[in-house]
C-alpha cells in the first residue's frame, strides 16, 4: 500500500498553507465564493469557526484511528505468532466485517444506543479503520526475512525481545502505510458524523446542501480534501524515512 510522495515537501506545504488560510482567514476568500451564491445568501459559513471545526474533525479521526491501530496491531501480532496462526482466518473475517456495513448504517445502529454526537461517529470510523492497519500489520510481520529472525533467536533473544527489537521495527513502514490509508479514508468518512450532530467539516457541507448554497459545500469539501492531502503527504514521508535504504 505504498505510494509515491506527492511532490516532496511542496506537496505538503502548499496544501497546508491553503488549509491554514481557509481556516484562519476565510473572509478574505469571500469575493471568490460570492460568485457561487445569489445576492441574498451568505458566501462564507459563519455558524461556527473553521478552526473549531478543524479541531473536532481531526479529533474524531485521530481518536478513532488511534483505537483502531491498537486493536489491529494487537490482532496482527497475535495471528503471526505460532500459537495464534490458526486464528488468522477468523481475525481477518472480523476485520473485514467492519467494512461490510456502510458508515451511515453504523451510525443508524449506534445512535439509539449511544445517542447523538461524537461517540457514534467514533464507532463508525473505528470499524472502518481497522482493516487496512490489520492487513498491513500481518503483511509486514510475515515479510520479515526468516534469516533475520533466526539470527535474533541465535543471539539468545526471547520471543518478546525478537518481536519488539527486530520484527516490529522491520514491519513498521508497512504498518505506517496501513495507518495512512485508514487516516485518509476516515478524514472523508468523518463528514457523515455531522448527520448525527458531531462537529466537523461535514456540518458546512450539510448546511450547504440544505440551503442549496454551493459556496458552503465547496468550502467544506475543499477543506476535507486539503486535510487528507496534508496527512497523506506527512505519513508518506514518515513511511519513507522508516524504510530501510535501497
Image: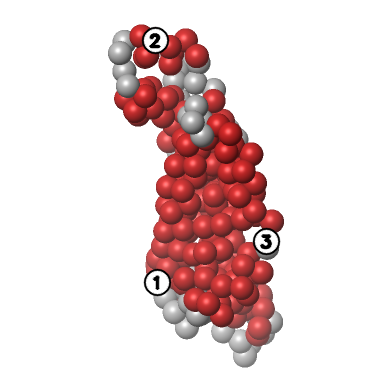
Instruction: Tell me what residue is drawn at x 34 percent, y 28 percent.
Output: 160
Instruction: Tell me what residue is drawn at x 50 percent, y 80 percent.
Output: 115
Q: Residue 151 carries which label?
A: 2
Instruction: Tell me what residue is drawn at x 61 percent, y 73 percent.
Output: 109
Instruction: Tell me what residue is drawn at x 44 percent, y 79 percent.
Output: 48
- Badge 1: residue crowd in 10 Å (few <14, some 14–19, many ≥20): few
Label 1, secondary structure: give it.
Answer: helix
Mark 1 and mark 2: span between their CA atoms? 51 Å
Q: Which residue is disc 3 drawn over?
A: 101
Foreground residue, 155 or 174?
155
Foreground residue, 186 or 16?
186
Mark 1 and mark 3: span between their CA atoms? 30 Å
Q: Is residue 231 above or below residue 163?
A: below
Q: Earlier in the sequence, mark 3 or mark 2?
A: 3
Q: Which residue is disc 1 drawn over?
A: 52
Foreground residue, 43 or 176?
176
Amino acid at each position: 500500500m505504498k505510494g509515491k510522495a506527492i511532490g516532496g515537501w511542496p506537496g505538503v506545504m502548499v496544501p497546508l498553507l491553503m488549509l491554514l488560510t481557509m481556516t484562519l482567514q476565510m473572509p478574505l476568500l469571500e469575493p471568490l465564493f460570492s460568485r457561487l451564491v445569489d445576492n441574498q445568501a451568505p458566501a462564507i459559513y459563519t455558524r461556527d469557526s473553521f478552526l473549531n471545526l478543524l479541531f473536532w474533525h481531526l479529533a474524531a479521526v485521530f481518536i478513532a484511528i488511534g483505537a483502531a491501530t491498537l486493536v489491529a496491531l494487537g490482532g496482527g501480532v497475535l495471528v503471526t505468532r505460532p500459537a495464534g496462526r490458526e486464528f488468522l482466518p477468523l481475525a481477518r473475517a472480523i476485520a473485514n466485517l467492519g467494512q461490510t456495513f456502510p458508515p451511515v448504517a453504523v451510525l443508524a445502529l449506534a445512535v439509539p444506543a449511544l445517542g447523538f454526537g461524537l461517540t457514534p461517529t467514533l464507532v463508525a470510523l473505528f470499524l472502518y479503520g481497522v482493516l487496512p492497519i490489520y492487513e498491513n500489520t500481518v503483511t509486514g510481520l510475515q515479510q520479515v526475512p526468516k534469516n533475520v529472525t533466526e539470527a535474533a533467536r541465535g543471539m539468545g533473544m526471547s520471543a518478546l525481545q525478537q518481536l519488539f527489537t527486530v520484527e516490529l521495527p522491520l514491519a513498521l513502514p508497512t504498518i505506517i502505510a496501513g495507518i495512512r490509508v485508514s487516516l485518509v479514508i476516515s478524514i472523508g468518512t468523518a463528514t457523515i458524523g455531522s448527520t448525527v450532530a458531531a462537529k466537523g467539516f461535514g456540518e458546512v457541507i450539510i448546511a450547504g446542501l440544505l440551503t442549496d448554497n454551493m459556496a458552503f459545500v465547496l468550502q467544506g469539501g475543499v477543506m476535507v480534501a486539503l486535510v487528507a492531502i496534508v496527512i497523506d503527504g506527512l505519513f508518506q514521508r514518515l513511511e519513507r524515512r522508516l524504510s530501510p535504504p535501497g
